[in-house]
Amino acid sequence: MYASGLPTRVLLAGEETPTAHDLRDQLQRQGFEIVRAANASEALPMLARLKLDAMLLELASTDAFAPELVSEILRIEPKLVLVLLADRNDARTAVLCLQAGAADYLTGANDPGTIIRALQVARERRAARTAEHLAARAVREEMAHMAASLKREQERVSHLAMATLDALVCVVEARDTWLAGHSVRVAELAACLAAEQGRTDAEIDAVRIAGRVHDIGMISLGDGILSKEGPLTPEEFEQVKRHVVIGSQILGPLPQFGLIGSFVRSHHERWDGLGYPDGIAGETIPWGARLLAAAEVYDALTTSRPYRETLTPDEAVRQMEQLIDTMISPAVYQALRTVVERRRALVFLPDSATRMRLSGTEFPDAELTAGFPGPADSSATPAIPSPRAVRLASSRGDAA
């Protein structure tokens, strides 16, 4: 049969002329099931009611709305193979109808063989397009599946990397009681400052992670330096300063921590350019590093120490005002002041300093005014720890 593998149920819409009657009979003899409609208006309701494979639509010579009619037919039944039979050649109408979705536009075609071949070609084109769409959808689905799998693997690797870094941080903090909880407090305060400055969720997470691992380079220091109660020698001081470089090097092989590594490297830079390791100043300091520096100073001032009373949040903020344009930027200070005034999520870990007061270890405030013990820092403000002092204080227990 001609109809084998072709559309079998065909709606023939047009006037019941002898020619149309003969066409219907010949199509039926070739194996097609023919459904008749007198015109397009009668055919439209049938499209929604009957399961049709194709439609042969006879166009009248006066039909000026053929393209709109084609669009309406395919809106009702998008998968229909629509072949138009016209009594005269109208190139413009033919082009518009094909653009609207018609499968073919035949002029003066009364031969069933010609119409069957047109149906066959149209069906093959439709099948090819369907196969292409299915293949494209399969490729899209496979790519989406691969992307989802890759994302899950990246998240797994990131979680594993973060767990490993957390373990290293715990090792550092376990070596010095005064460091316990310091990284968490700095991380949360820095995240609050980032939120206050209008940073995105991703940026807030980045600075929070940076705060958690900002002292990871301390793992390279010997126990003698971390636990030393007296002033550091110049050589020991240089070793301590290298913890920011070593920390960034630890994060370097992890591409997802690229921005975080820059924060870790630069969190001891100063707004006036007198910090380390690169001596950069102002806006050239990565924004996250500026927040970490301020958070470290605040944590040092508000955490209990054996040699002084703990400052209240408001007292710490008032003292830190003296550091504007030297250690910290005006914008960071304003964010800190606003956060503290609003008491935004500043929930710190329980302070373990009380039990340490019985240890007999005391450090005079004067040591903080000179940065790290060793070369004096004449630019420091009395009673306010510089980032250098905070780092040393942390290593000895002053900024836990």
Image: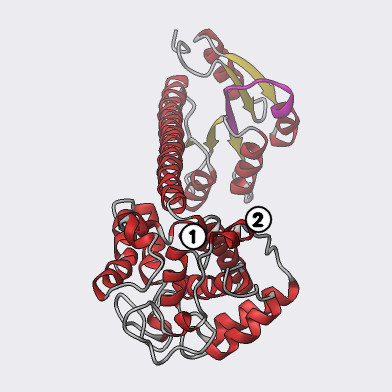
**Residue at numbered disc 1:** 206
Q: Which residue is located at x 48 percent, y 74 percent? A: 293
Image side of residue 103 versus residue 225, left or right: right
Q: Which residue is located at x 56 percent, y 84 percent? A: 331
**Around disc 1, counting alpha carbons within 10 Å, would you say few (fewer than 14), some (14 to 19), or many (20 or more)?**
many
| Kind of residue at badge 1 | Ala
Q: Which residues are magenta?
A: 47-57
- Asked whether residue 52 is drawn in magenta, I would say yes
Who comes first in sequence, dot 1 or dot 2? 1
Q: Is residue 263 above or below residue 134?
A: below
Q: Secondary structure at mark 2?
A: loop
Q: Secondary structure at mark 1?
A: helix
* Residue 291 can be seen in this image: yes
Q: Position of residue 119 (x, y in %)?
A: 47, 25
Colouring: secondary structure
Residue nearest the observer in this picture, 238 or 103: 238
Q: Which residue is located at x 55 percent, y 80 percent? A: 332
Q: Position of residue 22 (x, y in %)?
A: 57, 17
Q: CA distance from mark 1 to mark 2?
A: 25 Å
Q: Position of residue 299 (x, y in %)?
A: 57, 69
Residue nearest the observer in this picture, 121 or 233: 233
| Kind of residue at badge 2 | Pro
